[in-house]
Amino acid sequence: MEDKGEVKCIKFSLGNKILAVQRTLKSVDFLNFIPDSPQLEYTQECKTKNANILGFCWTSSTEIVFITDQGIEFYQVLPEKRSLKLLKNQSINVNWYMYCPESSVILLSTTVLGNVLQPFYFKSGTMSKLSKFEIELPAAPKSSKLSLSERDIAMATIEGSCKKTHILKLNRTGKFALNVVDNLVVVHHQDTETSVIFDIKLKAEFDGSTTIHQFVLPPRSIQPYQIPVAGPASVTSQSPVPCKLYSSSWIVFQPDIIISASEGYLWSLQVKLEPVVNLLLDKGKLMDFLLQRKECKMVILSVCSQMLSEPERGSLSVIATVFDKLNHEYKKYLEAEQSYTLVVEAGLSRSNPLLKRPVRTQAVIDQSDMYTHVLSVFTEKKEAPHKFTIAVLMEYIRSLNQFQIAVQHYLYELVIKTLVQHNLFYMLHQFLQYHVLSDSKPLACLLLSLESIYPPAHQLSLDMLKRLSTANDEIVEVLLSKHQVLAALRFIRGIGGHDSISARKFLDAAKQAEDDMLFYTIFRFFEQRNQRLRGNPSFTPGEHCEEHVTFFKQVFGEQALMKPTTF
Amino acid sequence: MAAAGGAGQEKQLAPTLLSFFIYNPKLGPKEGEEEKKILFYHPNEVEKNEKIRNVGLCEAIVQFTRTFSPTKPAKSLHTQKNRQFFHEPEENFWMVMVVRNPIIEKHKDGKPVYEYQEEELLDKVYSSVLQQCYSMYKLFNGTFLKAMEDGGVKVLKERLEKFFHRYLQTLHLQSCDLLDVFCGISFFPLDKMTYLKIQSFINRMEESLNIVKYTAFLYNDQLIWSGLEQDDMRILYKYLTTSLFPRHMEPELAGRDSPVRAEMPGNLQHYGRFLTGPLNLNDPEAKCRFPKIFVNTEDTYEELHLIVYKAMSAAVCFMIDASIPPTLEFCRKLDSIVGPQLTVLASDICEQYNINKRISGAEKEPQFKFIYFNHMNLAEKSTIHMRKTPSVSLASVHPDLMKILGDINSDFSRVDEDEEIIVKAMSDYWVVGKKSDQRELYVILNQKNANLIEVNEEVKKLCATQFNNIFFLD
C-alpha cells in the first residue's frame, strides 16, 4: 500500500475482501483484496458539503456507512467497477457515534448536550431510523457543553432488544466501565475495584415505562488472569503473577473485551456461574438467574443436588419452587417443539420460511437430566429420611403434572423402588388408587413382580392392564399363570376374542391346574368352538392338541368326546 | 304355622344387647377364685354368681369345641332366645357378647305371646361388631396385655370399665348389617392433580410441624390419604366418621347465633379449627389435651396424640408421638400454618369435585342400589345406606333384603373361587351378588316381571358404568 499520508482509521469489510482506509476528514479510500484483481485504490468523498467524516462502519461485505458531523451516508461498494453507489443519506447533527455490529445498529449522539440518541438499523441495502431516546442527565448542565460523551454509553445486544427501557441502579459514584457477557450487563467500578452484574431479564421494579434494576449479586472483583512469568524453562517454576485489575489504563470494548494498555493484554470477560450459587441465597431467584445463562445446565443440576442433601437441604416449598421453574422452562420448549412438528407435519413449513426448529438451550432440563444427575443419585444415597425422599419425588411428579408434562416411567419406578424398600406398600397402594402413577405396561409388570411380597399388587396390576385396553393378551397370560383358566376364558369371551385364541394354551393351563372338571369344561368349550367355526368338534392338527385329546379320553372315556352334528 | 288366620296386632322387637363380658381363664384357675377371671361385665348389676356361671359356660363351650377344631374353636352359640358370640383377640383374653334374638310380639287370647326369631341374626355381622369393639378399645387404650404390664389386673379393669361403659351404649345392634362385616373405608373420588396438591400439602405440613409422625386427610367424611397402616386407619376412620365428625357440626352451617359459632375464635383469615384439643386458642388457659391412640400394636407399638383439625369439609389428622405433649404454642403454630392453607385447599377440592362431577355426569343418582367392597384396599361404596348419622348408618331397603345380602356374603367367604349368586326375593326384588378376585358387589334390583337374563343384563350395565376402570369379571 502506498504511503499517501497519515492513516486515521482502517477497516476491512465483512469477509475481508475490501479494505477501507480513512486518511482525511473528507474522504475514504478503498482497496480490493480480490484475487486476480488489480490492487488499485479508489476513493469516495462524503456527499455532504463542508461535512467532516467522523468515521465509517461496514454493515455487510459490500455496504458501508459514513458518519459525518452532519449526517450519515449509506453506500454500496462495487469492487469490480471500483466505485461506490449512494443508497441513502440522512442529515442530522452528530456529536459522536457508536456501532453495534451484532445488531447492525448505529447510535448517533445529537443535540447540543449530546444526550439525545438516535439509532439507525441497517439490513441488506436498507436503512431504517429507529425511535430516538433521551438520556436523563444527573444535573442541569451549566453550559451548553457536550454533557454525554461516548465513554458513558455502551451498546450491546441483549436478547435482541435495543431499546432504553431499563435503568441500572448503581448507587455509587466514580468511573464506570461496562461489558456485556451472556446477556448480563457487567459494570466495573474503578474506585472500589469491583464489578456488579445486572440481569435485565429478571423481575424488577417497573415504573410504567422503564424497569429499574438493582444488581443481582453483591459487588465482586474480577478473578485476575494469571500471567505466566516469561523466562527460561528453568525458572518457570515461579508461580504466575496475577495481573493488575481495574487499572486506569483499561479500555473496555463491547461486548466483552477489556484491554489493559499498560500491561499490553487483551482479555475477554467471562461469567463464572459456580460462585454465583453461593452468592444468591434465594434459590428461586438463583434459578431465574441461572436459567437465562448459556452454560447453565450442570450448575443448575448441581444446585438441585445440593438442595436435596445435607448440610444445605432446602425446605420442600423451596424445592417445589425450583422444580416449578425448571419445568416451566421445559414445558415452554416442549410446546415450541410440538407446534413446530405440527406445522411441519401439516406441510406448511415451505410457505413459512421463518419457521425454525426451536433451539434447545441448556436451560431445558428434562426428566432424564433430573433422573440421571439428581433424583436417582439422591435416592440411592439414602442419607435423607425416606419421608423426605418420597416427598421430593412426589413434588417433582406434582410439578410435572402441573405443567401437563407426561411423566416418564423411570420416575414412577424410582418412587415404587423407594416405597418397596421401606415396606410402604399401603402408601404405594394409595398412589395407584388415585392414578398418581400413570398406567403403563411396564408399570403393570413391575407390580406383578411385587405380588410375592405384597399380594394386592396382583389386583392393582390387573386393573391397570384392563384400563390400558391394549393389554388383553397380558391379562390372559396373567390369569393363566395363576391357573385361573375359567376367568381367562370369560374375560376373552367378554371382549369377543375367543374365536382366535389358542386352544392349546388354555388346555395346557387347565391340565396344570390338576382339576379334572375344569379341564372338562375348557375342553368342551373348544370342541363347541370347533363345531361352530368348522362344523366339526375335533381339533385340527395345526392346533397341536393331540395330547390333550388323549388325556381327555383317558380321564372321561372316548364316548365323552363331542359327536359331530350333521345338518 | 297356625297363627295365620288370627294375626292380631304384631309387634317387632329389635335385637338387643343382653350382656357383654371379658374374661381371662388364666387369672382364676383355682376353684373358688372364678370371680378373678372376670375383667369386665355388663350389665354390672348382675349377681356375682350368675356372672361366674355365664363365664364358666362360655369357657366350657370354647373348651369343648376345641376338641373338634383346635385352632378354630366356637365363634357363636345359637339358642332359642339369644345368640352368644365369642372372640379371643389376645391369647387367653375372651370377649363375649350376648344378643337377644328379635322377637315378634303377638296377642293370643288377650295375652302377649313372644316368638323368638332364631335365624334372623347373622353370625358374621355380629362377630364383626364384637371384633370392632376390641379394635376400638385397642385404638384408644392399647392391648389388654399392655395394660396388664402397665399396672396389672387393676389397671386393665379400670380401662375396660372406662371405655366400655360408654362405648356399649353406642352399639346399635338393631341396625347392624353387611357394612359392619366390611368395616370399609369410603374414599373420596379425586383427580390426579388435586390429589398431588394434597400430597404436597401434607408433606409440607409434616415438614413444618416436624413432630408429626403420621397424617391422614379426609374430605366430606371420606378418606383421601392415610399415613397410617391400613388396619389402624380402618378403625380410626370408623371413629372419625361415626363418632367425632357427627359430634362437630359445621359452624359455617350453624346459624349465626348458634353457640357453636360463638366458640369460633375471631379469626377471619381461615376456617380452620380443632376438633380435638383446644377450642379457643386465644384463651391462655385453654387445655391442649388430645386423645391418645395406639397404632402398630403388632410390632412397634406406638402411642400417639390425635390432633384432628378441620377447615370447611376438609379434615386432617396429625398424629404426634405421645412422649411430646403438644403445647398451646404448638397449637397456635399449627393453626396459623395449616389453617389458611387448608382453607384454600378445601375450596380447591370442592371446586374440582364439582367440575369432575359435571364432566362424568355423575350428578344423576344411579337407579341401582348396590354395595361394593374391595378387600384389598377396604374401599367401600354403598348407595343403599343414607349418610351416616351420629348414631347409625341406615339402610334404605327392607331388613329382609339386607339379610339376603349378608347370607350371600357368608356363602362367598366359604370359597376362594369367583362366584355369582342371583336371588329372587319377595315382591319383584332381585338380589345379585358377585365376587371377582378380592372384590364383592351386591346389587338390589326392583323390576316388575324381570327374568334372570334381564337381571343379568342390568348388572352388566351397572358394572360397565360404575366399574369400568377395574378388572371385574362379568
Image: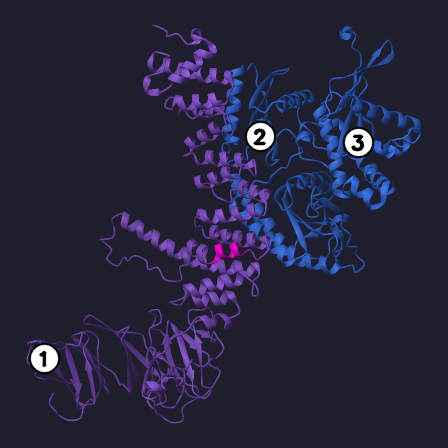
Chain colours: A purple, B blue
Q: Is residue A120 above or below residue B44?
A: below
Q: Given this view, does label 1 or label 2 mark the residue nearer the observer?
A: 2
User: In percent of the image, x 51 and y 54: which residue is there?
Assistant: A380
Name the residue tied to disc 2.
B438
CA gap, disc 3 and disc 2: 30 Å
Chain letter of mark 1 equals: A
Q: Chain of mark 3?
A: B
Q: Which residues are magenta?
A: A374-381
Residue bearing mark 3: B94
Picture quadrant where residue B416 is located? top right
* Same-subunit check for callouts 1 and 2: no
| Front residue of B312 and B103 | B103
Secondary structure beneath dot 3 equals: strand
| Residue type pointed to by label 2 | Gln
Q: Nearer the viewer, residue B344 or A406?
A: A406
Q: Secondary structure at mark 2?
A: loop
Q: Which residue is mark 1?
A: A83
Where's residue A204, x and y in %? 47, 71
Q: Residues within 10 Å of mark 3 (few under 14, many from 20)?
A: many
Q: Residue at x 35, y 51 (%)?
A: A338
Q: Marks 3 and 1, how far apart in space?
A: 116 Å
* Number of other residues with Cα within 10 Å of mark 2, as a class: few under 14, some 14 to 19, many 20 or more: some
